[in-house]
Image (tube, helix red, strand yellow):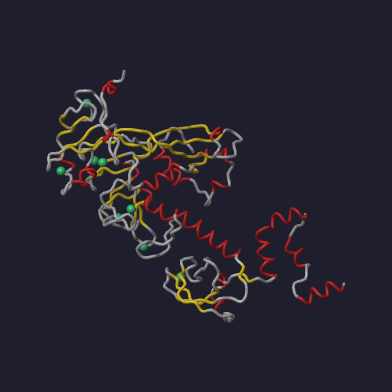
Amino acid sequence: MNQTQKYIIPEQFKNQVLMQQIFKLKLGGKDKNNVDDHIIIKTFPCEVMCDEKLQDQQHKLNTIYFHIPLKYYDETKTESEQLVDFANTAQLEPEWYYKMDPDQLTYSKYFIKEDIGCQHFIRACQLLCNTCNKYYTCRFCHDEIEDHKFPKQETKMVKCIYCKCEQPFQQYCQNCKQCFGKQWCEICRAFCNIGNESKPMYHCKGCDSCMTGWAHQWRHCDKCNSCVRVDCFQGHQCVKFDGTCPVCMGDLEDTIYGRMLLNCSHAIHKHCYDQLIRQGEYRCPVCRRFLPVEEEREILINHFKKLLKETVIFRPIRYVQFHCLECQRDFYGAFHSFVVMCGKCELFNVETRENIIGNRELADEEWIKYPETKPKFCTVEDIREILYSKYQIELEKEWNLENVGDALNMYPKTKEQFLSYLQK
Ligand SMILES: [Zn+2]
Ligand SMILES: [Zn+2]
Ligand SMILES: [Zn+2]
Ligand SMILES: [Zn+2]
Ligand SMILES: [Zn+2]
Ligand SMILES: [Zn+2]
Ligand SMILES: [Zn+2]
Ligand SMILES: [Zn+2]
């Protein structure tokens, strides 16, 4: 019998842990959703289930994610190293995962397991607050209830959750020998059992705090007064993570959750950003500029550009006044659903200011200035062009032709041509 099995854990110390599983598909497997084809590579704790991230975590539980291509996957590395190395070395085009054979990828899925600690950490002890003299599982749990901040580095005593033995700060219980946390910091007086796979910890002297990550991957910047990734350090934009997150109003400086900087220089929690993107909210909650970053930004812009190319509008056209939230430019254009591009900044972050209903044609100079913003009209030429660009490869195969464009050009374009065609 395990030493700790003789102790009953009170309900208040039971927590739920989101477990992550990395898997690949059997050779020839086509569908990541077919559980029978899954070959599990690794299983490890990812994070503790908590109210702040519930939406994000629920989404993870219901989704199977693309992870890393098999040829880049190194089973000897932890996932946290793996992801950084992959981001630094692999030069893949956006949406690479759709262009590879399903059995040449790794995936990740999630499930829940019961563990011990609180909503913030997996740990087997409570810490004594030097101010109020009460035991709490962590400083966040303390700060939610008490009117003062937990003086974390001053903790001298801990209390084992299993055997309730109170003792000086140490990693193993002196009574029942239970490990309070595989990761621990003597300076911060903190324990964590999430593990290195998803949450490695290192103590940063500059931040005077334990940070998530590998020490060799991060460097402290004195100007930002925070840690910046080594590979982005040169020429990084200095920023101080302070104040609150504009989505959840939670603290950005003192947080155990990932945070990020938007293109507009506003800061936000990583999980709050993901939530906005999932909800189709593509504007910064503070300044309303285009929200998506990095690869997501590229994918979305390309997606909207494609939509714009394939959208046909019918006459009579409703002309409206638009306002670009990026460059603050006002311009007139044809109203067509939601794909409106600002020709100047080539972004789809435009709002409709004023409706002008009429069938006046837009002056040519307006389109000529930013021709890429001109939508396709319901004309033979425009529809032909859309079909051609969309189905070119299929049509060439089907018709066994070199160039479908030439074939299409043999067909009459105008009413006059059509009539003369009929007379032949
Ligand atoms: Zn206290
Ligand atoms: Zn806690
Ligand atoms: Zn104990
Ligand atoms: Zn520390
Ligand atoms: Zn800096
Ligand atoms: Zn937030
Ligand atoms: Zn912003
Ligand atoms: Zn603009």
* Rendered-image quarter of ligand 2: top left
Instruction: Determine whether 154 is above or below 380 in the image.
Output: above
Q: Position of residue 149 (x, y in %)?
A: 17, 47
Q: Residue furthest right?
A: 424
| Quadrant of image for the N terminus | top left
Side of 323 where 31 appears, left or right = right
Q: Is any atom of residue 364 visible in this view?
A: no
Instruction: Determine whether 385 is above or below 101 in the image.
Output: below
Instruction: Determine whether 52 is above or below 389 in the image.
Output: above
Q: Nearer the viewer, residue 186 or 16?
A: 16
Q: Position of residue 299 (x, y in %)?
A: 51, 56
Q: Position of residue 269 (x, y in %)?
A: 34, 52
Q: Nearer the viewer, residue 57 or 214?
A: 57
Side of 338 where 115 appears, left or right = left
Residue at horizontal 45%, vertical 36%? 21
| Quadrant of image for the C terminus | bottom right
Q: Is any atom of residue 142 visible in this view?
A: yes
Instruction: Determine whether 287 is above or below 23 in the image.
Output: below
Q: Position of residue 39 (x, y in %)?
A: 52, 32
Side of 222 where 265 appears, left or right = right
Q: Residue furthest front?
A: 11
